[in-house]
Amino acid sequence: MTRTLALALIGAAACQAAAPDAQALLAGYDRLRNGWDSFSVRVRIQTFENGKADEAYDYEVYQKGAERTYVEFLSPREKGQHLLMLGDDMWIYLPDTSRPIRITPLQRLQGNASNGDVARTNWAADYNAVVLRGEAVDGAQCHVLELTAKRKGATYRKVHLWLRAGDGRPVKADFFLASGKHAKSASYDQYETVNGRTVLKQMTLYDRIRNSSYSVMKYDEWNPRQLPDRMFHQGRSERF
Amino acid sequence: MHAGIVLLAAAATLAAQSGGSETRFAFSLGDEGGYTAGLRAPIESGTNLGIAQGSFAWREGGRFRFAASAAALAATAEETHSRLLVKETYFGFTAGDFDFLAGKKILKWGTGYAFTPTGVLDPPRDPSDPTDRLGLNQGRELASLEYIRGRHAVTAAWASGGMLQRHRPGLNETFAARDNFMLKGFDTSVIFAKMRGRPVLTGANFTRVVGESVEVHAEVAHCESTVVLAGGQYSFRSGVNTTVELYSPGAGGPRYAFFRIGKSRLRELPGWKEWDLGGMVLANLRDHSRLLIIDVNRRFGNHLSVYGRVQAPAGAKWRSEYGMIPYAALLTGGFRVQL
């Protein structure tokens, strides 16, 4: 009896040691989405409605660390607009003006692929992660993580994220609003190697409220480079 | 000669180190027709405005910048008058923590939507068109030096009273300084300005986001009198955004209220998400006159948008600010193509 109990305890301890570190897995996910501490990347979002190409948006995203993102809008209709994210705070700059407009968290969610989807990609800073279970997806064993927002700047209140057990690559994700509504799903479609690092090249966001609509987000021209701190100051008069 | 070669080599090295050059350009073409209904003055009831606008910006790494934008207008009432507006033309460079800029540039220090007591260098704000929907705001001829370090961005600027454009009314030579910083979620600015012929203006403004849905902003400025603005925005889960402002332009002057409600992408459904709808009310709280504005915009693809606008004043005719507007309604409609 004592020996059986001891063996059971040893087995339990071994299982505990083998349980994956959810926050470490999430940090690995962040490295695929944000390859370097300071970089820029060109993002193109093509939306589809009932299978047909609908709207297209282009952005130049500049990121420094987990808390600072600057987005330049390049599509014809939005040209001249800029978005700045500092921690939980976001501003939008309109053309012909150096005056920023503060955006509320709800305003970030508006649109098909929201400002938060483009600008807020450091999930380890925004979410607490726990491993819910293991699950096989398309023949690959995955860890299923539940992410719960730990700060008001997080785009979604809850995320379920499937990461491949072998290499930590994301396979898919579900996004939930504060109301509990399942708003979007994502599939992580392609990767590429840039300067020796594996980074995300394409993902697809599916609208789960209107199932006829989805957006393909493509990441190109990854450019690791030193970005000046002044680029990320909300009071700076110069906006390129 | 040796010194010249050394300088050229230094400049070339600096340019090479700063990471290459980038350019941005944009061009748009538009036309807007207007009709005044219930006209009470001997002016043309029908008007037309053609606008062509272009902008160009060049950046050499993080160090040198040049930008220019202009608008060509052709306005037709009884006759056609054409004009070229230079909105901005300026050159800037960065040295260490300093940004230097000289030329004609739009600077906006105010945080208000329809009004701004602290916007000492801002283009004149028209509360019935707070976003400058036609993009016709012009910059001031100025030179500025900005120092950004840590949390603070400190700007000192001199703006002329009009060197190349002496005919712009209401412009005074101005020296101004601003310190902008974030403090516990408040985006805060402290502003000092001295306009020729007027006492020193001291002012401050802030914006703050509260919770998920609320943004508040306020400005106060004291020059000859104290001018105050208080306002806020509320975002509904449905995507509707509202803005409210109260403005008091000094002792003895009228108080104003501004309210705007609008939604971009009316519904996330095919045929609906291309529509934007908004309405504004601007009221003089002293004489109770009001101006009501409704805007509708419809996008076609990535380049074309078509819009309509109705503007209707109300108030005691000829005895109130908006009641003096000599028409019952102004209807405008137009299109804009952006490349």
Image: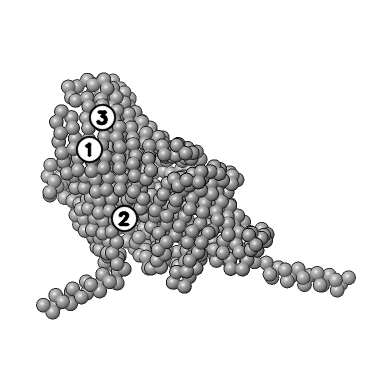
Residue drawn where x is 31% and y is 26% of the image: B312
Vertical order, B40 against A1 (above or below): above
**Near-viewer residue (B196 or B172):** B172
Residue drawn where x is 35% and y is 60% of the image: A231
Residue hosting label 3: B34
Vertical order, B105 against A190 (above or below): above
Residue hosting label 2: A239
Residue drawn where x is 22% and y is 71% of the image: B11
Residue B131 in percent (x, y) is at 32, 41
Image quadrant where one finds the C terminus of chain A = bottom left
Q: Name the residue type under label 1.
A: Gly
Vertical order, A191 against B220 (above or below): below
> In what element is the residue under mark 2?
loop
Image quadrant where one finds the N terminus of chain A = bottom right
Residue B5 in percent (x, y) is at 15, 76
Residue hosting label 1: B50
Residue A157 falls left or right of residue B150: right
Closer to us: mark 3 or mark 2? 3
Q: Name the residue type under label 3.
A: Gly
**Near-viewer residue (B284 or B302):** B302
**Near-viewer residue (B78 or B288):** B78
Q: Is residue A70 visible?
A: no
Q: Name the residue type under label 2.
A: Arg
Residue A103 falls left or right of residue B92: right
For mark 3, name the chain: B
Mark 3–mark 2 CB contact (< 8 Å): no
For mark 2, name the chain: A
Furthest-right residue in this view:
A1
